Image (cartoon, rainbow, N blue to C red):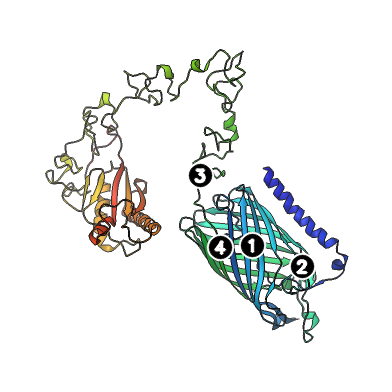
Amino acid sequence: MEAPVRRLIRFSFLGAVLGCLTTLVSPAAQAQTLSGFQVNRYEPTAAGEWSFAVDHPWYSSTRRLAAGLTLDYAHHPLMLGVTNAGGFSETRPLVGDLFIGHFDFAVSFLDRILVTASLPLTFADSGDLAAGATVGDPRLGIMGRVYGQPFSSVFSVSVGAQLWIPLRAMTSAISATASDQQVRVLPKVILGGVWRWLMWSATAGFLYRQDAAVANLPVTVAADSAGHVGSELQFGIAASYFDAQRRFSVGPEIVLATTATGPSAFSRFGTSLETLVGAQYNIARLVQVGGALGLGFVREPGTPDFRMLIRIAYAPFRKAEKDTDGDGIPDSEDACIREKGVRTGSAMNNGCPPSTLERDRDGDGVTDLHDICPDVPRGATPDPDRRGCPLSAKPAEVPTDKDGDGVLDKEDACPDVPKGPQPDPNRAGCPSQDSDKDGVIDPLDQCLFEPAGLTPDPARPGCPLADRDGDGVPDPQDACPDKPGAPSPYPKRNGCPGLIEVKNGQIVILKPVFFATAKDTILPKSYAVLQAVADGMQAMTSIKRVAIEGHTDAQGKFDANIDLSDRRAKSVMKWLVAKGVEIGRLEARGYGPTRPIASNKSAAGKAKNRRVEFHIIDVPAASQAPTEKAN
């Protein structure tokens, strides 16, 4: 376990111990139940989190800091009532309406530590114990990542602790319903992760809190109806639909607590169960806004029957870097993207498992990571200035093979290019050339400067089948060999004029694809041309992969256009897959207004720019491509 994590765990348990000691060293507090306590039970998660009450911590790979305000309205959080055989009957509100603002701040560093702070301020309240505007106990917190990344791993573990500073112990000016008289400490464990569109988290903790009862009851209120609080077990669970690309989340949260000390310990009246359903959205990767509604199903003092939350925070949201193996090292820096590893600082093995760092290709006892001559044993007289090198081997004399093809650089005519499975017989260490780039090397290509194309001639390697009209359908299969047309699975229409053509590396559609305004919904009048594309791809199986590109005009916001074009391209791909085109032959991406084909200054030009294109991006080597047949 890394040193920062060990320190964090020690801090968490130290905080818990300090909380207990604070209570133990106060004989008066131990001798009797304290009078008054912070009534409101809601404690906001760190500013910038995608949850409201159940922690799902972020660290500096997501954002470095966040600050905001959580507005909290609670209805009937503290009720007067009578306990009888039928249960608890509410009679009047001690605190009927409670409106609080929580000022929140959070900062993360080392991509492992999150420090938080929250200050509650009561704006207004009502009921027999209403105190008006007042400040509550400030809360300080710290969390640390022990395993995984909450926003890039399916499973992660964090630990932390929170500490409340009792302002009422310092001044009597603070309301007895807004503050405790003793320090509160809450160590906790947080599990969480993201799997596809599901963001989940679960928490468990123990709140160390001095037993206390409602203070300053009106003379008309029976003393035995006062509520009690004490140390308690707390649990939370949350699950939400989370879209990192569009930056929003929506889902439920459940918080359960049960008192472990005092007269209400582990009883119906010392247990609370509150649920929240909320949604949040991050605007322009800078400002996060959200709202939630909640109900208290099982209630103890401080749990309202209804709650409403509104959050706003400055929370710069970094674009998450892909981390395939979930080791905390992004793929762009990871030399082993499919194996969990460690940071080494070397581009050769950064992010690789420790076992791979022990490789020793030349078997001289110096691992490749530290060996200046990894392919030359250091021998009986190693060079003291160059680890892993023999003393006799000067830098210019050490044989090298940069491309690793078995031909030493001094003899290799292509030292940076492996010779491959079919080397050039006339140039040592070089692969045979393919002048026309059709996958057939020159020594075997019977049409050296003419690509074999989509329909290679099986009798003449590297040559295309005859295609007089140049529509991509060879003459033996073309029902209209002298008229450019489109491929079709129906022999009598194969190669005849239709709604598409195959030319210049594209499936060219002769009619545009129409969508609902500002949406990715395909209109029915475009089904015919998309069906022609599907028929063409099913007829020409030599087209291995097609890129569907979505484009827009320049009207509107740039990011919105990129997003709309991307959704439209994916909508077309989904339509083609539904019509029988294998999904592995398709990919889709939106480019928004970045690739115009006409001026955006006229309506006609904008209409041309709003388009969908089909680009052929993967054609097999001619020597392996089958002859096309329209059945």
Graded by Cα atoms within 10 Å as few (under 14), some (14 to 19) or many (20 or more), the crowding at tag 4 reads many
Q: Earlier in the sequence, mark 4 or mark 2?
A: 2
Graded by Cα atoms within 10 Å as few (under 14), some (14 to 19) or many (20 or more), the crowding at tag 3 reads some
Q: Earlier in the sequence, mark 1 or mark 2?
A: 2
Label 4, label 2: how far apart the Cα atoms are = 32 Å
Graded by Cα atoms within 10 Å as few (under 14), some (14 to 19) or many (20 or more), the crowding at tag 2 reads many
Which residue is more in the foreground, 314 or 622? 314
Label 1, label 2: how far apart the Cα atoms are = 19 Å
Residue occupied by mark 2: 230
Label 3, label 4: how far apart the Cα atoms are = 30 Å
- Please name the amino acid that badge 4 sits on: Ala
- Please name the amino acid that badge 3 sits on: Thr
Q: Earlier in the sequence, mark 1 or mark 4?
A: 1
Residue occupied by mark 1: 236
Q: Earlier in the sequence, mark 1 or mark 3?
A: 1
Which residue is more in the foreground, 551 or 77? 551
In contact (CB < 8 Å): disc 3 and disc 4: no
Residue occupied by mark 3: 324
- Please name the amino acid that badge 1 sits on: Gly
Residue occupied by mark 4: 313
Coordinates of residue 514 in the picture (x, y in percent): 28, 60
Q: Nearer the viewer, mark 3 or mark 4?
A: 4
Q: Residue at x 39, y 19 (%)?
A: 412
Q: Secondary structure under badge 3?
A: loop
- Please name the amino acid that badge 2 sits on: Gly
Image quadrant where one finds the N terminus: top right
Residue 11 position (above or below residue 128): above
Coordinates of residue 140 in the picture (x, y in percent): 69, 59
Q: Residue at x 61, y 65 (%)?
A: 254
